[in-house]
Image (cartoon, rainbow, N blue to C red):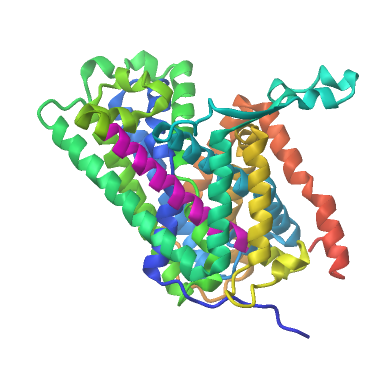
Amino acid sequence: MQQPERPRQRLRLFDATTLVVGSMIGSAIFLALPLMAQKVPSPAILIGLWVCGGLFAVLGANCCAELAAMLPGSGGQYVFFREAFGNLWAFLFGWTQFLIVQTGINAAVAIAFGKYLGSLVPGCGEDHVLASIPLGNLLPVAVQAHVPKGLECLQINSAQVAAGAVIVLLTAVNIRGLREGVWVQNVFTVLKVTALAALIIAGLSHGLSSPRFIPPAATPTKELVFGAAFLAGLAVALSKALFAYDAWYTVTFVAEEVHDSKRTLPYALLLGTAIVTVVYVLANLAYLAVLPVDRIASVKDDRVAVAVGETLFGGVGAKLVIAAVLVSTFGCLNGLILGGARLCFAMARDGLFLRSCAKLHPRSGTPATALVYQGIVSLVLTFSGSYSGLLTYTMFASILFTGLMVAAVYRLRFTQPARPRPYRCWGYPLTPALYLVMSAAFLVYVIIGNPVGSGIGVLLIASGIPFYAIWRRRAGATVGR
């Protein structure tokens, strides 16, 4: 029997850590605070939410580190679910990631790149519409009345074209070789962290003479803190911070390409999430040191970092921050593309996805076909104009699968107690339990706050079941495990 192709181990600790940091830091750190300040007008609580989000990410990375060191295979959570809950749940995770979660995030980050590029290059923004296609007119008259307004007419703008171009470019870079993709990741991660560090130093230095971190007028009253409206706003604000901390698990998708993965992966996960937590908290402290919270809540287009740069250095500062956002989103997208394709590769190698995705490029040793398919779906979502809505629909699925990954720690401790664990989750069983409690609470909030979107998320997950049956049948295996 022919052995499946396996990629070469080339990633060291620095490479793996930059993949964690670079995949996490995208555009959210430059945009999230105004959205949070609109719901929670208290600097002290806002900073507390960023600390809470960092704690949540570190707790998740702590649990993931045990699984990654024990099961260092390409595909990350896919491998964990396969071992803990069987092939079906593993496939449903991979299916959902490929169908919309991973590819949708790729599209969202690329669109953010296109939007900010339009701020520097005239004619490259969303306002510059290149084509308008009346899709609604192509449907039967009886159906046209039920088509969502966003899909009645498909508009293609310059920002989408720029986003599509950067997806194609980075997909090509990563097909060319892992070394090239990692080089881009390392350079752009160092650049974005350096840019944020400069903004943090300038902002905190500016605010030393008149700090605004906890002004009495902005502190909520006791009645407001414990009111239902405030708690609902608190949950919404926390969701923005949690989104900014997402994607810390991307490095597990390339586990087979990490040198000494049983030791390197835990260090990379914990070090990377810790670095991002410190950067995020200090960045938001810097924003609040420069601008009062009410000014932050009303910043145009939520571009708080641009407003801070303009306040500190004028028009030049605003352009420098925009350039930093371009660097950040470019590096983030590269990490997402690099890691995400390895999930398709792992599924195909098990006979649970398109067989061609299991092949490695003969010269570069990269999963070229998986990268191409991922790029195509990302492009479709980029030009569909509905990627943000699809991401909303899958929030339920994303939280569910992350919680299941942490639950896999308990499951495997029970079913495979003798299996070697090079890294053991510290604080077990309390730390995984704390993460699950926080996930469950947030999951309940998502269901209550958006029952339709959660229902669509469930349907997207379930849509993979017939495809799972088809691929398992072709592989000559029995459905389920």
Q: Count how many numbered circles sit on residues in the image.
A: 0
Q: Residue at x 68, y 64 (%)?
A: 369
- Residue 439 seen in the figure: no
Task: State whether residue 187 is above or below residue 288.
Answer: below
Nearest the viewer among 59 and 72 is 72
Residue at 33 percent across and 31 percent down: it is: 306
Q: Write the start and end of the magenta stretch as one range.
A: 317-342
Q: Quadrant of residue 412?
A: bottom right
At horizontal 31% and vertical 17% (from top left) the residue drawn is 294
Q: Position of residue 297 (x, y in %)?
A: 36, 20
Residue 219 pos. (x, y %): 28, 19
- 419 drawn magenta: no
**Quarter of the view holding residue 414:** bottom right
Q: Position of residue 183 (x, y in %)?
A: 42, 65
- In the image, is residue 114 above or below residue 249? above
Residue 72 lies left or right of residue 213; in this view the side is right
> In this view of the protein, can residue 267 be seen by the observer?
yes
